[in-house]
């Protein structure tokens, strides 16, 4: 589990975001997401989402929806995957590029590419899986 990254000095951060970054369940869900353990990370993000009422709620919901989209793909439910990938991507597009200590731009790019493939009926095997990366912070590596 990765420690919560510290915000840059000029980066505003909400109390809710600070509390979530300090919660080890967030980092466990992030690690599960990056391990493509879609069901487990869905459970983790959903638990945090239910407990969150402020500005970080849409971020958690977007991450949750992308994870569930990938779970639908594993279960050969392309229609469900398409709907949830689109909903998750739509939510994350309205969020800051850096939220919860994560860089959302790379995730949005991969999710967008996968959504396009789903909509076109393409085989997604050659496309990268979604991953979550830490926000740029003095040489931190992506979360594993």
Image: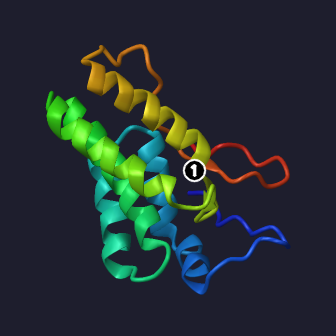
Q: Position of residue 99 (x, y in %)?
A: 59, 63
Q: Quadrant of the N terminus?
A: bottom right
Residue visible at 44% across and 39% down in the picture: 35
Which residue is disc 1 drawn over?
104
How many numbered marks are there? 1
Does the image show residue 38? no
Q: Residues within 10 Å of mark 1 (few under 14, many from 20)?
A: many
Secondary-structure class at tag 1: helix
Determine whether 57 is above or below 144 in the image.
below
Q: Is residue 72 left or right of residue 13?
A: left
Determine whether 84 is above or below 114 in the image.
below
Residue visible at 75% across and 51% down in the picture: 136
Q: Is residue 123 left or right of residue 142?
A: left
Does the image show residue 120? yes
Q: Position of residue 75 (x, y in %)?
A: 15, 32
Name the outermost residue toward the bottom: 15
Q: Quadrant of the C terminus?
A: top right
Q: Position of residue 5 (x, y in %)?
A: 70, 64
Q: Judge by depth and name the residue closer to the eye, 93 or 3.
A: 93
Residue visible at 40% across and 79% down in the picture: 52
Residue visible at 79% across and 55% down in the picture: 137
């Amino acid at each position: 589990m990765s420690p919560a990254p510290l915000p840059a000095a000029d980066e505003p951060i909400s109390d809710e975001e600070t509390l979530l970054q300090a919660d080890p369940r967030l980092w466990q869900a992030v690690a599960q997401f990056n391990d493509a353990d879609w069901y487990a990370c869905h459970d983790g993000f959903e638990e945090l989402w239910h407990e969150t009422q402020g500005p970080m709620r849409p971020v958690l919901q977007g991450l949750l929806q992308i994870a569930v989209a990938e779970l639908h793909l594993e279960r050969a439910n392309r229609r469900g995957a398409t709907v949830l990938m689109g909903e998750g991507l739509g939510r994350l597009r309205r969020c800051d590029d850096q939220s919860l200590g994560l860089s959302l731009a790379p995730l949005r790019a991969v999710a967008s590419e996968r959504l396009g493939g789903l909509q076109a009926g393409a085989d997604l095997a050659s496309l990268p899986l979604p991953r979550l990366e830490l926000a740029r912070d003095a040489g931190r590596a992506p979360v594993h």
